[in-house]
Amino acid sequence: MAKYRKKLMERGEADYARAVTVLDDDMETIAIISTERAGRTKGHIPMGEGDVMLRAGINKETGATLFQITASIGYWGDWRFYSLGSYSTPAGPVGVTPRVISRDVITCMAGCKYQETVAVDVDIQTLELIAASGEPWRFRFQGRGPVWNEEMNPAEVKALLAAVSRYKAGRGLS
């Protein structure tokens, strides 16, 4: 755990800022800003690998912004059906019910490899607190089988918030 956390915390805001992507198609009413390309080392997933990323959806007319934690896990064995979750805040853990984005069978040989992607909405105040904390942001997802624990560097949160601010300022949105 200590080795994983050390590697996770090595990167700074500038590293994450280079990986932030903006999807802004003139045929869409919502612009998407994501840390998906920031990548992740393998987390704390028995017989699996995962990634947790942030996304912001910005209404290009009003500036209203929805923030989302998106988590994707691949694993071998039986379906786990992740349906409960929580994330850390300075005030204590917040329980959430993740929305299922996708559930896929990747391959089947002697056993099957599955991939589940879930999402949770999070408010900007929580993101600002996490960004300022300097501590890893912790997540937990539960279903059938092993609990899935992940962490995110607060510098990744800072990079997303800065990208959202730049996007909105550049378009005169509040």
Image (spheres, rainbow, N blue to C red):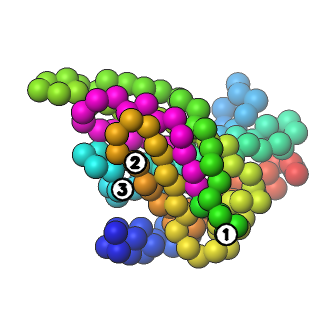
Q: What residue sits right under mark 1 in the picture? A: 90
Question: Of label 3 and label 1, which has the lower sequence position?
Answer: 3
Q: Amino acid at mark 1?
A: Pro
74 inside magenta stretch: yes
Q: Which residues are magenta?
A: 71-87
Q: Amino acid at mark 2?
A: Val
Horizontal and vertical percent position of residue 82:
46, 36
Tag 3 secondary structure: loop
Q: Is residue 56 left or right of residue 8?
A: right
Question: Of label 3 and label 2, which has the lower sequence position?
Answer: 3
Q: Nearer the viewer, mark 1 or mark 2?
A: 2
Horizontal and vertical percent position of residue 55:
61, 46
Q: Is residue 77 left or right of residue 51?
A: left
Front residue of this view, candidates 32 and 48: 48
Quadrant where the image shows the N terminus: bottom left
Give residue 147's mark: 2
Crowd rating for badge 1 (residues with CA inside 10 Å; few <14, some 14–19, many 20+): few
Distance Cα–Cα, label 3 vs label 1: 22 Å
Crowd rating for badge 2 (residues with CA inside 10 Å; few <14, some 14–19, many 20+): some
Observer able to see residue 37: no
- For this orientation, the residue located farthest to the front is 144
Give residue 43's mark: 3
Horizontal and vertical percent position of residue 85:
54, 45
- Compared with residue 52, is residue 10 higher up or lower down, i.e. above or below? below
User: Which residue corresponds to the image point at 24% horizontal and 36% vertical from the top-left?
Assistant: 76
User: Which residue corresponds to the image point at 28% horizontal and 29% vertical from the top-left?
Assistant: 78
- Compared with residue 40, is residue 102 higher up or lower down, i.e. above or below? above
Tag 1 secondary structure: loop
Q: Amino acid at mark 3?
A: Gly
